[in-house]
Image (cartoon, rainbow, N blue to C red):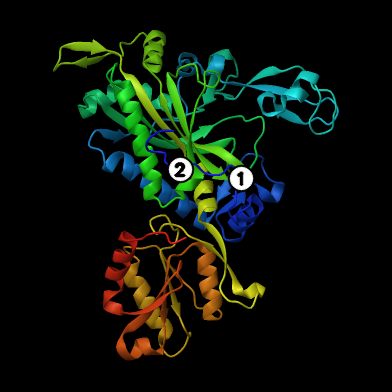
Amino acid sequence: MSEFNEYCPAEQYTGKATMEKITSLAKRRGFVFQSSEIYGGQSGAWDYGPLGIELKNRIQTQWWKEMTMLHDNIVGLDAAILMHPRTWEASGHVENFTDPLVDCKKCKSRFRADMIPDENLSAKKCPDCGGELTDTRKFNLMFKSHIGPAEDTASVIYLRPETAQGIYINYKNIIQSSRMKIPFGIAQVGKAFRNEIVTKNFIFRTCEFEQMEMQYFVKPGTDDEWFNEWRKQRWAYYQKLGVKMDHLRWHQHGPDELAHYAKDAYDIQYLFPMGWRELEGVHNRTDYDLSRHSQYSGKDMQYIDQDNNERYIPYIIETSAGLTRNVLMILCDAYDEEQIADKGNEDDMRTVLRFHPALAPVTVAILPLMKKDGLAEFAQDIRKELQDDYSTDYDQSGAIGRRYRRQDEAGTPFCVTVDYQSKEDGTVTLRFRDSMEQVRVPKAELAARLRQEIKSYKRIK
């Protein structure tokens, strides 16, 4: 156990979220929809609705801030999805990016061979129906297409299966244009595509997804030190987000798990409702990638250290997290059900998403107690004052308690209620999602109070 992973959680998930509840809530409140649902849905693809895209963008913003704004020696990049096909020969994806595949001859189910019990695989027996399984064969996960009018071997192109290679082939451009000196990093967020054999668990494993990757270039011999440093930094990042740290753990790749390019690799795993699953990886990729691109392109990928009169191919420490997988983690982590009265009625239960305010799709909801008597106009004025700094919502329909429940379910951390007293003394009611506490705040002090509450936010449950 590493010195910065002091948590040793139980193996069994005990949270209140289930994948069924998360999937239902995601659709009901406009977080995530099934892609092409009116045509029966497209397997392995999902659409992000109004709340979902806001949540995804905020997670990306927090990661980008952590990686670039808070580090003087890390810069950004947005590389093209379509890259020269030799890129994927050099990276090893054409040869090695495969999963073992078996089919059932009886029920026609398809499986990854490494995900079914050994006894079924050795007996060639389907775990679903008991039918006979085919021989194991390799299945390349890259989507292949053609560019240009002719569909021949010369026009083959691939949808990128990862964003990292775009960073490696631009590494010299970054050095020359940005005058970066080792150690330095390049960060990128972008789409990636994998022709997964099996897509499941909602948005956890999909064919189209987004990655948040940072490649850190270091001098050979210092790689172990930087590898441990980036493990510490990535662990601390999730603490900043207010994630339940007893639902996180490290998993080190054994000899049979290590990728062909890796010297060492650890995953940060999260305890999802379906069990422990990878959330982010930290890898020591050595000089494999730059050496291969140098070999295949014929270009010199060495770093020239003018201060020490040295030339070498850098080692790379990679941090790689799934953006869409982080969305699912944050939804599961924030989900809670709470009884708010002792009557035991269904109406006395609330579903609440306890997002960190920096991640919440809506920061503050403005709720006039009544539509009449100028309360709606007063509330709209408050919304206009807050819109430049906060994501806001406005809701004037239904009983105030039901409006609070709707905002709780969307994860809105603050509600501002405008009532008749507001017209008399200029104060409003500020309601806190987590504690349901309500306080009176002068309208003129509201923006400053929100800033203070966000900055000092601590999850209470």
Amino acid at dot 2: Tyr
Residue 152 relative to residue 232: left or right: right
Residue 312 relative to residue 356: left or right: left
Residue 147 visible within the image: no
Name the residue at 31% across, 85% down.
Answer: 426
Foreground residue among 418 and 257:
257
Label 1 element class: loop
Picture quarter containing residue 306?
A: top left
Q: Which mark is residue 7?
A: 2
Local packing at callout 1 (Cα closer than 10 Å; few below 14, some 14-19, many 20+) is few
Q: Quadrant of the image for the N terminus?
A: top left
In the image, residue 107 sits, relative to residue 22, either above or below, namely above
Foreground residue among 265 and 2:
2
In the image, residue 11 sits, relative to residue 23, either above or below, namely above
What's the distance in space between the residues labelled 2 and 1, CA to CA? 15 Å
In the image, residue 240 sits, relative to residue 163, either above or below, namely below
Label 2 element class: loop
**Residue 213 x, y percent position in the rendering:** 41, 33
Q: Which mark is residue 12?
A: 1
Amino acid at dot 1: Gln
**Residue 140 x, y percent position in the rendering:** 61, 21
